[in-house]
Image (cartoon, rainbow, N blue to C red):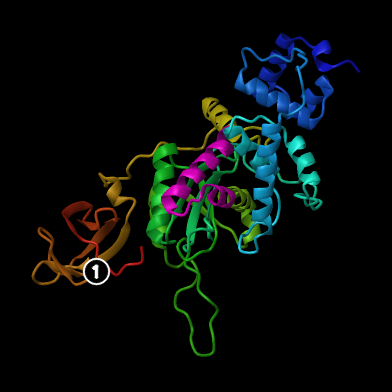
């Protein structure tokens, strides 16, 4: 069989790859037409997406394929540094990541293939045989973006140079596999999950469903009755603060019964952990702000440059095309009546009764409540402002806001 550049012109290949990107035919069909393997296909696809108008496969013989002594030294240095990390018993890394090495070398302006790095790794005893993977049988279960958002958190020591562990919150769209939200939080709290959900909804809109586990933040789960106690409230008889917010917004919630059922959102944690931990060691990063910049870069690489193994497409391109074609179940976010501010939607809620002096007591604070009859219950919306160390309080009665006040955050004994 003749080489590809002898069988197809550049213009023909541009048309074919353009048709693939527009969904006119599948990857398998295009591979058969071009008579190339999967690795070669994705390499050409990546080159086409970088420069679709000037894409070419014109054969040009390089002057020399031999690497310079300086490049060889850089590869050897990177591999030996990688070996130190892999063999360090205090680091949660057990295997080599040659693609990550390639990416770090590219930042230094060194272009070298993963195959070349692996060859050098074997020569330097910086190689471990890979375990045989199971046959890839995952599939996309939804037909539109916004049909299902998987949301989860992971506690890990993301920087080995820090004594602290942080929670990584992520939200991924099932159809496109795009990471719609990813950020670190020092603690896993109800308020942190509300903030993560608020960021996603205000940026992309209201999805049809959220898929979460049975963590107490998301769901009230009652244990079984015992000989000593019979429970009055059963599972889901009480809405959590996060669930109240989702019910108000009209977003359905589905609960996973096991960690294995959340594979689509659990899987990114593995490669994020591998990449982020390595980068923190190489670049000597230890604070949450420093590591957050690494997370941002990895999410950008995943969303905008990496072809997903299940969809066969770059997540952001698949997401953008679905939105352009109207294949979306996201609804425009608008404040539900009678509320006039996001502070009344993305908040913590409680109730109090107005006493005979038209006041309520809230965590040792006495607050006057005007224009409300005595002994009436009022709804209180609490919004923590942690940077300013304030608690914004908005009091509602009879579908009207009757009072608002901001108090010092210290002293409010509520689980945020």
395 horizontally vs 65: left or right:
left
- Exactly how many numbered labels are in the figure? 1
Give the residue furthest to the front: 69
Q: Quadrant of the N terminus?
A: top right
| Location of residue 175 in the rendering, given as x and y in whole percent from the top left corner | 60, 39
| Location of residue 359 in the rendering, given as x and y in whole percent from the top left corner | 12, 67
* Mark 1 closeness class: few <14, some 14–19, many ≥20 residues within 10 Å: few
Q: Give the camera-side residue of 53 and 126.
A: 126
Dominant secondary structure of the residues highlighted in magenta in the image: helix
Residue 233 on the magenta segment: no
Res 208 seen here: no
Give the residue furthest to the right: 1
Q: Where does the magenta region start and end?
A: 277-304
Q: Give the camera-side residue of 252 and 14.
A: 14
Q: Residue drawn 68% across and 48% down?
A: 80
Give the residue furthest to the left: 357
Determine which residue is flagged by label 1. Answer: 411
Q: Give the camera-side residue of 39 and 242.
A: 39
Res 328 seen here: yes
| Location of residue 194 in the rendering, given as x and y in whole percent from the top left corner | 39, 54
Residue 294 on the magenta segment: yes
Quadrant of the rendered structure where residue 407 is?
bottom left
86 horizontally vs 370: left or right:
right
Q: Residue drawn 66% across and 58% down?
A: 260
């Amino acid at each position: 069989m003749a080489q590809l550049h002898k069988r197809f012109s550049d213009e023909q290949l541009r048309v074919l790859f353009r048709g693939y990107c527009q969904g006119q035919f599948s990857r398998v069909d295009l591979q058969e037409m071009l008579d190339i393997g999967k690795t070669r296909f994705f390499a050409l696809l990546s080159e086409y997406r970088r420069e679709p108008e000037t894409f070419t496969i014109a054969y040009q013989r390089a002057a020399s394929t031999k690497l310079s002594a300086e490049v060889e030294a850089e590869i050897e240095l990177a591999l030996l540094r990688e070996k130190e990390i892999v063999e360090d018993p205090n680091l949660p890394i057990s295997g080599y990541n040659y693609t990550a090495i390639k990416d770090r070398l590219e930042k230094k302006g060194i272009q070298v293939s993963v195959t070349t790095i692996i060859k050098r790794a074997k020569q330097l005893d910086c190689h471990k045989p890979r375990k045989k993977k199971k046959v890839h049988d995952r599939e996309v279960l939804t037909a539109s973006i916004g049909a299902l958002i998987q949301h989860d958190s992971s506690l890990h020591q993301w920087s080995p140079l820090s004594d602290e562990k942080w929670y990584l919150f992520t939200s991924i769209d099932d159809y496109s596999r795009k990471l719609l939200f990813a950020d670190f939080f020092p603690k896993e709290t109800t308020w942190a999950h509300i903030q993560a959900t608020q960021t996603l909804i205000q940026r992309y809109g209201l999805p049809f469903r959220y898929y979460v586990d049975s963590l107490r933040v998301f769901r009230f789960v009652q244990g079984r009755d015992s000989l000593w106690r019979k429970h009055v409230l059963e599972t889901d008889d009480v809405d959590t603060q996060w669930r109240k917010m989702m019910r108000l917004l009209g977003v359905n919630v589905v609960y996973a019964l096991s960690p294995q059922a959340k594979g689509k959102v659990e899987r990114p944690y593995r490669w994020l952990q591998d990449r982020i931990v390595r980068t923190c060691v190489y670049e000597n990063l230890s604070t949450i702000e420093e590591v957050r910049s690494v997370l941002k870069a990895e999410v950008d690489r995943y969303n905008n440059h990496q072809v997903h193994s299940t969809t066969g497409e770059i997540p952001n391109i698949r997401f953008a095309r679905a939105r352009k074609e109207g294949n979306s179940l996201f609804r425009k976010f608008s404040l539900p009546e009678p509320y006039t501010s996001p502070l009344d939607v993305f908040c913590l809620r409680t109730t109090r009764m107005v006493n005979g002096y038209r006041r309520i007591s809230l965590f040792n604070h006495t607050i006057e409540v005007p224009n409300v009859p005595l002994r009436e219950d009022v709804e209180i919306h609490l919004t923590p402002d942690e940077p300013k160390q304030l608690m914004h309080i908005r009091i509602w009665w009879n579908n009207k806001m009757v009072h608002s006040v901001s108090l010092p955050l210290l002293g409010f004994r509520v689980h945020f």
